[in-house]
Image: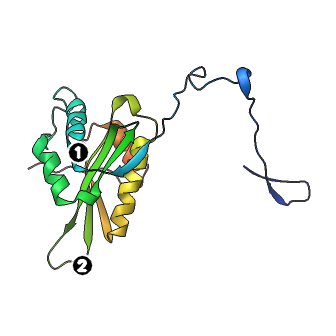
């Protein structure tokens, strides 16, 4: 934290919290402890875990209007197309989230388009910053690739996802169904 002292000079100050038995643990305060999460590029050995996590999240009762098909071919196809844009979040050897996408180029266009196809976090690890870390790493890779326009899509009634993406600068959604 930055504060000003009596003569107007800026100085750093720290808040000291009690340590030892008197200090409350995150669980005692009602918050969850953030695990040590590694964000890394997805490897071929991660494909089964990514597929099964997607199966847990993309169920017909949770996403009845999902227009893309979640199956093993979806995972393998994206992985084979643009491996460097497939990321996983891992805690103690367990895949807890992933981001998958690609770079789209068009003939007669100097622009590259980034497309985030899937962003998933296991329900027990949501609200811990995992999706943000995956998104930022994915975004960094897109910028490094020279992407000028970044596209995402989500269902119009997926309010948590809409809030997440609006907080990252994406505009109001529009839908076109053919």
Residue drawn at x 18%, y 29% as measured from the top left: 59
Which labelled disc corresponds to residue 169?
Answer: none
Whether residue 127 is visible here, answered yes or no, is yes
Q: Is residue 27 above or below residue 163?
A: above
Helix, strand or loop under label 2: loop
Residue drawn at x 17%, y 46% as measured from the top left: 75
Mark 1 or mark 2, which is nearer the start of the sequence? 1
Whether residue 69 is visible here, answered yes or no, is no
Which labelled disc corresponds to residue 110?
Answer: 2
Which quadrant would residue 156 be assigned to in this image?
Answer: top left
Foreground residue, 2 or 140?
Answer: 140
State left or right for residue 1 relative to residue 157. right
Q: Position of residue 28 (x, y in %)?
A: 60, 19
Which quadrant would residue 137 be assigned to in this image?
Answer: bottom left
Foreground residue, 171 or 144?
Answer: 144
Label 2 crowd bin: few (<14), some (14–19), many (20+), radius 10 Å? few
State left or right for residue 9 relative to residue 152. right
How far apart are the alpha carbons under marks 2 and 1? 35 Å
How many marks on residues? 2
Foreground residue, 140 or 87?
Answer: 87
Residue drawn at x 24%, y 40% as measured from the top left: 50
Q: Position of residue 149 (x, y in %)?
A: 30, 65
Query: Of the residues tagged 2 and 1, which is closer to the observer?
Result: 1
Q: Is residue 108 above or below residue 38?
A: below
Q: Which residue is mark 1?
A: 45
State left or right for residue 54 relative to residue 161. left
Residue drawn at x 25%, y 32% as measured from the top left: 57
């Amino acid at each position: 934290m930055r504060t000003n002292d009596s003569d107007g000079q800026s100085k750093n100050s720290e808040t000291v919290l009690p340590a030892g038995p008197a200090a409350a643990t995150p669980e005692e305060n009602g918050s969850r402890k953030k695990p040590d999460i590694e964000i890394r590029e997805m490897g071929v050995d991660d494909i089964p875990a990514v597929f099964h996590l997607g199966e847990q999240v993309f169920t017909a009762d949770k996403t009845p209007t999902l227009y893309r098909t979640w199956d093993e071919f979806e995972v393998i196809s994206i992985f084979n197309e643009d491996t460097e844009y497939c990321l996983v979040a891992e805690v103690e050897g367990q895949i807890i989230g992933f981001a998958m996408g690609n770079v789209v180029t068009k003939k007669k266009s100097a622009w590259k388009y980034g497309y985030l196809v899937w962003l998933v976090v296991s329900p027990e690890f949501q609200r811990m910053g995992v999706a943000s870390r995956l998104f930022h790493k994915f975004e960094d890779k897109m910028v490094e690739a020279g992407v000028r326009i970044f596209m995402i899509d989500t269902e119009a009634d997926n309010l948590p996802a809409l809030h997440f993406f609006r907080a990252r600068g994406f505009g109001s959604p529009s839908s076109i169904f053919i």
